[in-house]
Image (cartoon, rainbow, N blue to C red):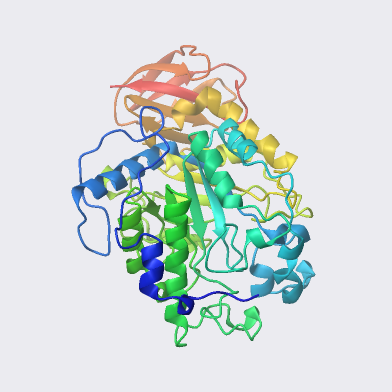
Amino acid sequence: MKTLTPTHISRRGLLQFLGAGSAAAVSPRWALGAGAGPGDLKPGTAPSCGEAVDPGRAQEWQKTLAWWQEAKFGMFIHWGPCSLASVEISWPIMEPEPQWGITQDEYVNLYKRFNPVKYDPTAWVELAKAAGQRYMVFTTKHHDGFCMFNSSFTDYKITNTPYQKDVVGMLADACHKQNMPLGFYYSPPDMHHPGFRDTSKLARENWHGQPARPEWPLYLHYMELQLRELLCRYGPAVVIWFDGLDHQEKYDGYHFVRMIRENSPGTLVNNRIGVPGDFETPEQRVPKRIPVKGVRISGTNPAEANALPSKLPNPEEVKPWETCMTINNTWAYNSHDRNFKSTEHLIRTLVDVASKGGNFLLNVGPTPEGTIQPEFQERLRGIGEWLKVNGDSIYGTKYGPLQDLTYGRTTAKGNSVYVHVFEWPKDKKLEVPDLGTRVAKVTLLAGGQRLHFEPVGNGVSIEVPAQAPDSRDTVLECAVY
Protein backbone atom coordinates (compact mmCIF):
# COMPACT_ATOMS: atom_id res chain seq x y z
CA MET A 1 0.00 0.00 0.00
CA LYS A 2 1.17 3.52 -0.76
CA THR A 3 1.59 5.87 2.19
CA LEU A 4 1.05 9.55 1.49
CA THR A 5 3.67 11.91 2.92
CA PRO A 6 3.75 15.70 3.24
CA THR A 7 5.82 15.85 0.02
CA HIS A 8 2.53 15.61 -1.89
CA ILE A 9 1.45 19.05 -0.73
CA SER A 10 3.23 21.96 0.90
CA ARG A 11 3.69 21.74 4.67
CA ARG A 12 2.18 25.21 5.04
CA GLY A 13 -0.88 24.20 3.04
CA LEU A 14 -1.42 21.07 5.07
CA LEU A 15 -1.12 22.84 8.39
CA GLN A 16 -3.49 25.56 7.26
CA PHE A 17 -5.95 22.89 6.14
CA LEU A 18 -5.85 21.34 9.61
CA GLY A 19 -6.19 24.67 11.38
CA ALA A 20 -2.64 24.89 12.69
CA GLY A 21 -2.33 28.56 11.86
CA SER A 22 -4.92 29.63 14.40
CA ALA A 23 -3.85 27.15 17.10
CA ALA A 24 -7.37 27.47 18.41
CA ALA A 25 -8.18 25.71 21.64
CA VAL A 26 -10.65 22.86 21.42
CA SER A 27 -13.32 23.17 24.10
CA PRO A 28 -14.41 19.88 25.65
CA ARG A 29 -17.81 18.58 24.61
CA TRP A 30 -17.95 16.30 27.64
CA ALA A 31 -19.10 18.01 30.80
CA LEU A 32 -16.64 19.26 33.41
CA GLY A 33 -19.30 20.10 35.96
CA ALA A 34 -20.40 18.39 39.15
CA GLY A 35 -19.92 14.67 39.03
CA ALA A 36 -18.23 14.74 35.64
CA GLY A 37 -15.15 16.91 35.98
CA PRO A 38 -12.59 18.46 38.26
CA GLY A 39 -14.34 21.66 39.22
CA ASP A 40 -12.64 25.03 39.46
CA LEU A 41 -8.92 25.40 40.07
CA LYS A 42 -6.71 28.45 40.17
CA PRO A 43 -4.69 29.19 37.03
CA GLY A 44 -1.18 27.78 36.96
CA THR A 45 1.45 26.68 34.50
CA ALA A 46 1.23 23.38 32.67
CA PRO A 47 4.38 21.76 31.25
CA SER A 48 4.97 23.00 27.70
CA CYS A 49 8.49 22.56 26.33
CA GLY A 50 9.90 24.21 29.42
CA GLU A 51 8.00 27.42 28.70
CA ALA A 52 5.13 28.99 30.59
CA VAL A 53 1.76 29.00 28.89
CA ASP A 54 -0.99 31.51 29.37
CA PRO A 55 -3.14 31.04 32.51
CA GLY A 56 -6.27 30.11 30.54
CA ARG A 57 -4.63 27.14 28.88
CA ALA A 58 -2.89 26.14 32.09
CA GLN A 59 -6.22 26.17 33.88
CA GLU A 60 -7.73 23.79 31.32
CA TRP A 61 -4.80 21.42 31.83
CA GLN A 62 -5.10 21.62 35.62
CA LYS A 63 -8.83 20.90 35.48
CA THR A 64 -8.31 17.80 33.38
CA LEU A 65 -5.47 16.53 35.55
CA ALA A 66 -7.47 17.02 38.74
CA TRP A 67 -10.51 15.30 37.21
CA TRP A 68 -8.39 12.45 35.84
CA GLN A 69 -6.77 11.79 39.22
CA GLU A 70 -10.21 11.55 40.81
CA ALA A 71 -11.61 9.28 38.07
CA LYS A 72 -9.20 6.44 38.98
CA PHE A 73 -10.51 3.79 36.56
CA GLY A 74 -10.55 3.67 32.77
CA MET A 75 -10.94 1.29 29.83
CA PHE A 76 -8.05 0.68 27.43
CA ILE A 77 -8.93 -0.76 24.00
CA HIS A 78 -6.51 -2.52 21.62
CA TRP A 79 -8.20 -3.51 18.38
CA GLY A 80 -7.45 -3.97 14.73
CA PRO A 81 -7.24 -6.45 11.83
CA CYS A 82 -4.82 -8.56 13.91
CA SER A 83 -7.86 -9.83 15.81
CA LEU A 84 -8.72 -11.94 12.75
CA ALA A 85 -5.62 -14.07 13.40
CA SER A 86 -5.85 -14.15 17.22
CA VAL A 87 -2.34 -12.70 17.49
CA GLU A 88 -0.87 -9.89 19.54
CA ILE A 89 -1.05 -6.48 17.93
CA SER A 90 2.12 -5.49 15.96
CA TRP A 91 4.64 -7.68 17.75
CA PRO A 92 4.29 -10.73 15.43
CA ILE A 93 6.01 -8.69 12.71
CA MET A 94 8.47 -6.89 14.99
CA GLU A 95 9.65 -9.91 16.96
CA PRO A 96 8.27 -12.94 15.10
CA GLU A 97 7.82 -16.10 17.14
CA PRO A 98 6.63 -19.54 15.96
CA GLN A 99 3.69 -19.34 18.37
CA TRP A 100 2.03 -16.65 16.24
CA GLY A 101 2.02 -18.74 13.06
CA ILE A 102 1.80 -15.73 10.76
CA THR A 103 4.18 -14.09 8.29
CA GLN A 104 4.63 -10.35 7.92
CA ASP A 105 2.97 -10.41 4.52
CA GLU A 106 -0.04 -12.25 5.95
CA TYR A 107 -0.23 -9.88 8.90
CA VAL A 108 -0.11 -6.62 6.95
CA ASN A 109 -2.83 -7.83 4.58
CA LEU A 110 -5.32 -8.87 7.26
CA TYR A 111 -7.08 -5.53 6.83
CA LYS A 112 -8.40 -6.70 3.46
CA ARG A 113 -10.70 -9.11 5.36
CA PHE A 114 -11.48 -6.96 8.39
CA ASN A 115 -15.23 -6.39 8.62
CA PRO A 116 -16.46 -5.91 12.22
CA VAL A 117 -20.16 -5.78 11.37
CA LYS A 118 -21.23 -6.21 15.02
CA TYR A 119 -19.30 -3.17 16.23
CA ASP A 120 -21.56 -1.08 18.46
CA PRO A 121 -19.66 1.78 20.11
CA THR A 122 -22.66 2.71 22.22
CA ALA A 123 -22.60 -0.77 23.78
CA TRP A 124 -18.89 -0.35 24.52
CA VAL A 125 -19.49 2.92 26.34
CA GLU A 126 -22.37 1.39 28.27
CA LEU A 127 -20.14 -1.52 29.31
CA ALA A 128 -17.42 0.87 30.51
CA LYS A 129 -20.02 2.73 32.57
CA ALA A 130 -21.37 -0.53 33.99
CA ALA A 131 -17.80 -1.39 35.03
CA GLY A 132 -17.46 1.92 36.85
CA GLN A 133 -14.85 3.14 34.37
CA ARG A 134 -14.86 6.90 33.96
CA TYR A 135 -12.83 7.35 30.78
CA MET A 136 -11.77 5.35 27.73
CA VAL A 137 -8.51 5.26 25.77
CA PHE A 138 -8.69 3.82 22.24
CA THR A 139 -5.76 2.61 20.15
CA THR A 140 -5.99 4.75 17.02
CA LYS A 141 -2.70 3.50 15.55
CA HIS A 142 -0.40 0.82 16.96
CA HIS A 143 3.18 0.02 15.96
CA ASP A 144 2.03 -1.80 12.82
CA GLY A 145 0.95 1.58 11.43
CA PHE A 146 -2.64 0.60 10.66
CA CYS A 147 -5.00 3.52 11.39
CA MET A 148 -8.38 2.83 12.96
CA PHE A 149 -9.48 6.33 11.88
CA ASN A 150 -10.04 7.88 8.48
CA SER A 151 -6.70 9.67 8.23
CA SER A 152 -6.19 11.87 5.17
CA PHE A 153 -2.50 10.96 5.03
CA THR A 154 -2.41 7.19 4.51
CA ASP A 155 -4.44 4.54 2.76
CA TYR A 156 -3.51 1.86 5.34
CA LYS A 157 -6.63 2.52 7.37
CA ILE A 158 -10.02 1.28 8.52
CA THR A 159 -12.00 2.98 5.75
CA ASN A 160 -10.12 0.90 3.17
CA THR A 161 -11.33 -2.36 4.72
CA PRO A 162 -14.56 -4.15 3.77
CA TYR A 163 -16.10 -2.40 6.79
CA GLN A 164 -15.27 1.06 5.35
CA LYS A 165 -16.61 2.98 8.37
CA ASP A 166 -14.55 5.27 10.62
CA VAL A 167 -14.30 3.33 13.88
CA VAL A 168 -12.73 6.18 15.87
CA GLY A 169 -15.30 8.66 14.64
CA MET A 170 -18.13 6.35 15.66
CA LEU A 171 -16.67 5.81 19.12
CA ALA A 172 -16.01 9.53 19.58
CA ASP A 173 -19.64 10.30 18.74
CA ALA A 174 -20.90 7.63 21.16
CA CYS A 175 -18.64 8.93 23.93
CA HIS A 176 -19.71 12.53 23.43
CA LYS A 177 -23.38 11.57 23.49
CA GLN A 178 -22.95 9.60 26.72
CA ASN A 179 -20.65 12.10 28.40
CA MET A 180 -17.72 9.65 28.48
CA PRO A 181 -14.26 11.27 28.22
CA LEU A 182 -12.19 9.69 25.45
CA GLY A 183 -8.43 9.55 24.97
CA PHE A 184 -6.33 8.39 22.05
CA TYR A 185 -3.43 5.94 22.13
CA TYR A 186 -1.06 6.83 19.28
CA SER A 187 2.11 4.90 18.48
CA PRO A 188 5.16 6.91 17.38
CA PRO A 189 6.77 3.71 15.97
CA ASP A 190 5.20 2.87 12.61
CA MET A 191 6.22 -0.25 10.71
CA HIS A 192 4.26 0.80 7.61
CA HIS A 193 5.63 4.29 6.99
CA PRO A 194 8.77 4.51 4.78
CA GLY A 195 9.93 7.56 6.70
CA PHE A 196 10.12 5.63 9.96
CA ARG A 197 12.18 2.76 8.50
CA ASP A 198 13.33 1.28 5.23
CA THR A 199 10.20 -0.71 4.40
CA SER A 200 12.00 -2.76 1.74
CA LYS A 201 13.28 -4.79 4.70
CA LEU A 202 11.29 -6.92 7.13
CA ALA A 203 10.14 -5.04 10.19
CA ARG A 204 12.06 -7.41 12.47
CA GLU A 205 15.31 -5.98 11.02
CA ASN A 206 14.70 -2.28 11.76
CA TRP A 207 11.59 -1.89 13.92
CA HIS A 208 13.42 0.53 16.25
CA GLY A 209 13.22 3.19 13.55
CA GLN A 210 15.97 4.92 11.58
CA PRO A 211 16.21 8.60 12.59
CA ALA A 212 19.55 9.05 10.77
CA ARG A 213 17.89 8.58 7.38
CA PRO A 214 16.97 11.78 5.48
CA GLU A 215 13.31 10.61 5.40
CA TRP A 216 12.97 10.91 9.20
CA PRO A 217 11.69 14.54 9.25
CA LEU A 218 8.95 13.49 6.82
CA TYR A 219 7.83 10.89 9.29
CA LEU A 220 7.71 13.42 12.15
CA HIS A 221 5.57 15.65 9.89
CA TYR A 222 3.26 12.70 9.29
CA MET A 223 2.93 12.18 13.05
CA GLU A 224 2.07 15.83 13.55
CA LEU A 225 -0.56 15.81 10.85
CA GLN A 226 -2.26 12.73 12.24
CA LEU A 227 -2.20 14.04 15.80
CA ARG A 228 -3.84 17.25 14.62
CA GLU A 229 -6.50 15.14 12.92
CA LEU A 230 -7.21 13.26 16.15
CA LEU A 231 -7.35 16.43 18.25
CA CYS A 232 -9.31 18.63 15.85
CA ARG A 233 -11.52 16.13 14.05
CA TYR A 234 -12.32 13.60 16.78
CA GLY A 235 -11.57 15.51 19.96
CA PRO A 236 -11.58 16.73 22.50
CA ALA A 237 -9.20 14.15 23.86
CA VAL A 238 -8.76 13.69 27.58
CA VAL A 239 -5.31 12.23 26.90
CA ILE A 240 -2.86 11.47 24.11
CA TRP A 241 -1.33 8.17 25.15
CA PHE A 242 2.01 7.73 23.36
CA ASP A 243 3.92 4.44 23.29
CA GLY A 244 7.35 5.32 21.96
CA LEU A 245 9.24 2.15 22.95
CA ASP A 246 13.02 2.71 23.09
CA HIS A 247 15.14 5.83 22.43
CA GLN A 248 12.08 8.03 22.60
CA GLU A 249 14.12 11.22 22.31
CA LYS A 250 14.19 10.71 18.52
CA TYR A 251 10.56 11.86 18.28
CA ASP A 252 11.18 15.46 19.41
CA GLY A 253 8.63 15.13 22.19
CA TYR A 254 8.91 18.77 23.24
CA HIS A 255 7.56 19.84 19.88
CA PHE A 256 4.62 17.44 20.04
CA VAL A 257 3.68 18.33 23.60
CA ARG A 258 3.69 22.00 22.67
CA MET A 259 1.52 21.33 19.62
CA ILE A 260 -0.97 19.37 21.74
CA ARG A 261 -1.08 22.14 24.37
CA GLU A 262 -1.79 24.73 21.67
CA ASN A 263 -4.58 22.79 19.97
CA SER A 264 -6.14 21.13 22.99
CA PRO A 265 -4.93 22.67 26.27
CA GLY A 266 -7.08 20.36 28.37
CA THR A 267 -5.44 17.21 26.98
CA LEU A 268 -3.00 15.24 29.14
CA VAL A 269 0.13 13.61 27.71
CA ASN A 270 1.82 10.53 29.13
CA ASN A 271 5.56 9.97 29.54
CA ARG A 272 6.36 7.81 26.51
CA ILE A 273 7.60 10.28 23.92
CA GLY A 274 10.96 11.25 25.40
CA VAL A 275 9.78 14.03 27.72
CA PRO A 276 8.55 13.76 31.34
CA GLY A 277 4.83 13.95 30.55
CA ASP A 278 1.94 14.53 32.90
CA PHE A 279 1.91 11.04 34.42
CA GLU A 280 4.00 7.90 34.80
CA THR A 281 3.03 4.66 33.05
CA PRO A 282 3.99 1.34 34.66
CA GLU A 283 2.68 -1.58 32.62
CA GLN A 284 1.22 -4.92 33.72
CA ARG A 285 2.23 -4.18 37.33
CA VAL A 286 1.61 -2.00 40.36
CA PRO A 287 4.68 -0.31 41.87
CA LYS A 288 5.42 -1.41 45.41
CA ARG A 289 5.92 2.21 46.45
CA ILE A 290 4.19 5.49 45.69
CA PRO A 291 5.59 7.16 42.53
CA VAL A 292 7.15 10.56 43.16
CA LYS A 293 8.43 13.39 41.02
CA GLY A 294 11.90 12.93 39.59
CA VAL A 295 11.65 9.15 39.22
CA ARG A 296 10.58 7.92 35.80
CA ILE A 297 8.43 4.78 35.72
CA SER A 298 7.39 3.33 32.40
CA GLY A 299 6.87 -0.18 31.08
CA THR A 300 7.18 -3.62 32.58
CA ASN A 301 10.50 -3.41 34.43
CA PRO A 302 9.78 -3.52 38.20
CA ALA A 303 13.36 -2.56 39.03
CA GLU A 304 12.54 1.07 38.17
CA ALA A 305 10.57 1.29 41.42
CA ASN A 306 13.74 0.67 43.45
CA ALA A 307 14.53 4.37 43.15
CA LEU A 308 11.28 5.31 44.90
CA PRO A 309 11.51 6.38 48.57
CA SER A 310 10.30 3.86 51.14
CA LYS A 311 8.80 6.51 53.40
CA LEU A 312 5.35 8.02 52.92
CA PRO A 313 5.85 11.03 50.61
CA ASN A 314 4.41 14.48 51.13
CA PRO A 315 1.46 15.26 48.82
CA GLU A 316 3.49 17.76 46.79
CA GLU A 317 6.11 15.07 46.06
CA VAL A 318 3.66 12.61 44.50
CA LYS A 319 3.67 12.22 40.69
CA PRO A 320 0.42 11.29 38.92
CA TRP A 321 0.58 7.78 37.50
CA GLU A 322 -1.49 5.16 35.74
CA THR A 323 -0.85 1.47 35.27
CA CYS A 324 -2.23 -0.32 32.22
CA MET A 325 -3.02 -4.02 32.41
CA THR A 326 -4.67 -6.80 30.44
CA ILE A 327 -7.49 -9.08 31.63
CA ASN A 328 -5.73 -12.10 30.16
CA ASN A 329 -2.14 -12.08 28.83
CA THR A 330 -2.54 -10.29 25.49
CA TRP A 331 -3.56 -6.77 24.52
CA ALA A 332 -5.39 -7.66 21.31
CA TYR A 333 -8.04 -10.34 20.93
CA ASN A 334 -6.66 -13.86 21.20
CA SER A 335 -9.15 -16.71 21.26
CA HIS A 336 -6.41 -19.06 22.50
CA ASP A 337 -5.53 -16.99 25.58
CA ARG A 338 -7.80 -18.31 28.34
CA ASN A 339 -5.66 -17.18 31.26
CA PHE A 340 -8.18 -14.66 32.59
CA LYS A 341 -7.52 -12.76 35.79
CA SER A 342 -10.36 -13.27 38.27
CA THR A 343 -12.78 -10.51 39.22
CA GLU A 344 -11.38 -10.66 42.74
CA HIS A 345 -7.84 -10.19 41.44
CA LEU A 346 -8.89 -7.20 39.32
CA ILE A 347 -10.81 -5.56 42.19
CA ARG A 348 -7.83 -5.95 44.48
CA THR A 349 -5.54 -4.56 41.79
CA LEU A 350 -7.77 -1.50 41.46
CA VAL A 351 -7.62 -1.06 45.24
CA ASP A 352 -3.84 -1.52 45.28
CA VAL A 353 -3.46 1.12 42.58
CA ALA A 354 -5.75 3.59 44.38
CA SER A 355 -3.94 2.96 47.68
CA LYS A 356 -0.79 4.35 46.05
CA GLY A 357 -2.59 7.30 44.46
CA GLY A 358 -2.71 5.97 40.90
CA ASN A 359 -5.14 5.22 38.09
CA PHE A 360 -6.00 1.79 36.67
CA LEU A 361 -6.38 1.49 32.87
CA LEU A 362 -7.81 -1.98 32.23
CA ASN A 363 -7.61 -3.30 28.68
CA VAL A 364 -10.06 -5.14 26.46
CA GLY A 365 -9.27 -6.60 23.03
CA PRO A 366 -12.48 -6.74 20.97
CA THR A 367 -13.24 -9.64 18.63
CA PRO A 368 -12.98 -9.47 14.82
CA GLU A 369 -16.76 -8.95 14.74
CA GLY A 370 -16.47 -5.89 17.00
CA THR A 371 -17.86 -7.35 20.23
CA ILE A 372 -16.23 -7.63 23.64
CA GLN A 373 -15.97 -11.27 24.68
CA PRO A 374 -18.20 -12.57 27.50
CA GLU A 375 -15.28 -13.34 29.84
CA PHE A 376 -14.21 -9.70 29.75
CA GLN A 377 -17.76 -8.45 30.17
CA GLU A 378 -18.37 -10.70 33.18
CA ARG A 379 -15.29 -9.38 34.97
CA LEU A 380 -15.94 -5.75 34.10
CA ARG A 381 -19.53 -5.92 35.33
CA GLY A 382 -18.34 -7.67 38.50
CA ILE A 383 -15.96 -4.80 39.23
CA GLY A 384 -18.79 -2.36 38.55
CA GLU A 385 -21.11 -4.09 41.00
CA TRP A 386 -18.41 -3.87 43.69
CA LEU A 387 -17.87 -0.18 42.89
CA LYS A 388 -21.57 0.60 43.21
CA VAL A 389 -21.27 -0.31 46.88
CA ASN A 390 -17.68 0.69 47.59
CA GLY A 391 -16.95 3.44 45.06
CA ASP A 392 -16.52 6.08 47.76
CA SER A 393 -13.35 4.27 48.82
CA ILE A 394 -11.87 4.59 45.30
CA TYR A 395 -13.14 7.64 43.40
CA GLY A 396 -11.58 10.92 44.45
CA THR A 397 -9.29 9.28 47.00
CA LYS A 398 -5.62 9.86 47.72
CA TYR A 399 -2.97 7.34 48.66
CA GLY A 400 -3.54 5.65 52.01
CA PRO A 401 -1.69 6.46 55.25
CA LEU A 402 -0.81 2.79 55.81
CA GLN A 403 1.22 1.26 53.00
CA ASP A 404 2.43 -1.98 54.55
CA LEU A 405 -0.68 -3.74 55.79
CA THR A 406 -0.40 -7.52 55.51
CA TYR A 407 -4.16 -8.05 55.19
CA GLY A 408 -5.15 -5.27 52.79
CA ARG A 409 -4.74 -1.64 51.74
CA THR A 410 -5.88 1.85 52.73
CA THR A 411 -7.18 4.84 50.78
CA ALA A 412 -8.12 8.29 52.08
CA LYS A 413 -10.52 11.11 51.25
CA GLY A 414 -11.44 14.13 53.37
CA ASN A 415 -11.99 12.98 56.97
CA SER A 416 -12.24 9.31 56.05
CA VAL A 417 -9.64 6.58 55.92
CA TYR A 418 -10.87 3.45 54.13
CA VAL A 419 -9.43 0.13 55.27
CA HIS A 420 -9.69 -2.49 52.52
CA VAL A 421 -9.62 -5.96 54.04
CA PHE A 422 -8.55 -8.78 51.71
CA GLU A 423 -7.76 -11.32 54.45
CA TRP A 424 -10.49 -11.40 57.10
CA PRO A 425 -9.33 -11.95 60.72
CA LYS A 426 -10.32 -15.32 62.19
CA ASP A 427 -10.61 -13.97 65.74
CA LYS A 428 -13.03 -11.18 64.76
CA LYS A 429 -10.45 -8.53 65.75
CA LEU A 430 -8.98 -6.27 63.09
CA GLU A 431 -5.87 -4.46 64.26
CA VAL A 432 -5.26 -1.14 62.52
CA PRO A 433 -1.90 0.53 63.23
CA ASP A 434 -1.36 4.24 63.81
CA LEU A 435 -3.33 6.29 61.28
CA GLY A 436 -1.62 9.47 62.40
CA THR A 437 -4.90 10.85 63.72
CA ARG A 438 -7.69 9.92 66.11
CA VAL A 439 -10.59 7.69 65.05
CA ALA A 440 -14.11 8.91 65.84
CA LYS A 441 -16.21 6.17 64.26
CA VAL A 442 -15.84 2.94 62.27
CA THR A 443 -18.50 1.57 59.94
CA LEU A 444 -18.82 -1.04 57.23
CA LEU A 445 -18.95 0.97 54.01
CA ALA A 446 -21.50 -1.46 52.57
CA GLY A 447 -24.65 -0.86 54.60
CA GLY A 448 -23.22 1.53 57.19
CA GLN A 449 -23.19 -0.88 60.14
CA ARG A 450 -21.34 0.74 63.02
CA LEU A 451 -18.50 -1.32 64.54
CA HIS A 452 -17.12 -1.19 68.06
CA PHE A 453 -13.44 -0.29 68.38
CA GLU A 454 -10.92 0.41 71.12
CA PRO A 455 -7.61 2.29 71.11
CA VAL A 456 -4.56 0.05 71.16
CA GLY A 457 -1.36 2.05 71.43
CA ASN A 458 -1.46 4.56 68.57
CA GLY A 459 -3.88 2.41 66.58
CA VAL A 460 -7.28 0.79 67.07
CA SER A 461 -8.68 -2.71 67.46
CA ILE A 462 -11.99 -3.16 65.63
CA GLU A 463 -14.59 -5.83 66.38
CA VAL A 464 -15.76 -7.22 63.06
CA PRO A 465 -18.35 -9.85 62.03
CA ALA A 466 -17.29 -13.49 62.06
CA GLN A 467 -17.53 -13.70 58.26
CA ALA A 468 -16.33 -11.17 55.71
CA PRO A 469 -19.32 -9.44 54.10
CA ASP A 470 -17.37 -9.46 50.81
CA SER A 471 -14.55 -11.99 50.48
CA ARG A 472 -12.99 -10.05 47.60
CA ASP A 473 -12.58 -6.84 49.60
CA THR A 474 -14.62 -5.64 52.56
CA VAL A 475 -14.18 -1.91 53.20
CA LEU A 476 -14.26 -0.28 56.63
CA GLU A 477 -14.64 3.48 56.81
CA CYS A 478 -12.79 5.14 59.68
CA ALA A 479 -13.98 8.66 60.40
CA VAL A 480 -10.95 10.56 61.69
CA TYR A 481 -10.34 13.98 63.17
Residue 252 in view: no
- Residue at 25 percent of width and 49 percent of height: 58
Question: Percent position (x, y) of residue 225?
Answer: 44, 66
158 above or below 417? Answer: below
Residue 39 versus residue 468: which sits nearer the camera? 39
Residue 120 picture quarter: top right
Q: Is residue 448 left or right of residue 33?
A: right
15 above or below 166? Answer: below
Question: Percent position (x, y) of residue 144?
Answer: 61, 68
- Counting the numbered discs, the total is 0
Residue 249 versus residue 458: which sits nearer the camera? 249
- Residue at 37 percent of width and 56 percent of height: 308
Residue 123 picture quarter: top right
Image quadrant occupied by the C terminus: top left
Q: Is residue 202 left or right of residue 185?
A: right
Residue 39 picture quarter: top left
- Residue at 50 percent of width and 44 percent of height: 360
Question: Percent position (x, y) of residue 107?
Answer: 73, 69
Question: Percent position (x, y) of residue 200?
Answer: 64, 86
267 above or below 5? Answer: above
390 above or below 269? Answer: above
- Residue at 52 percent of width and 33 percent of height: 178
Residue 370 in view: yes
Image quadrant occupied by the N terminus: bottom right
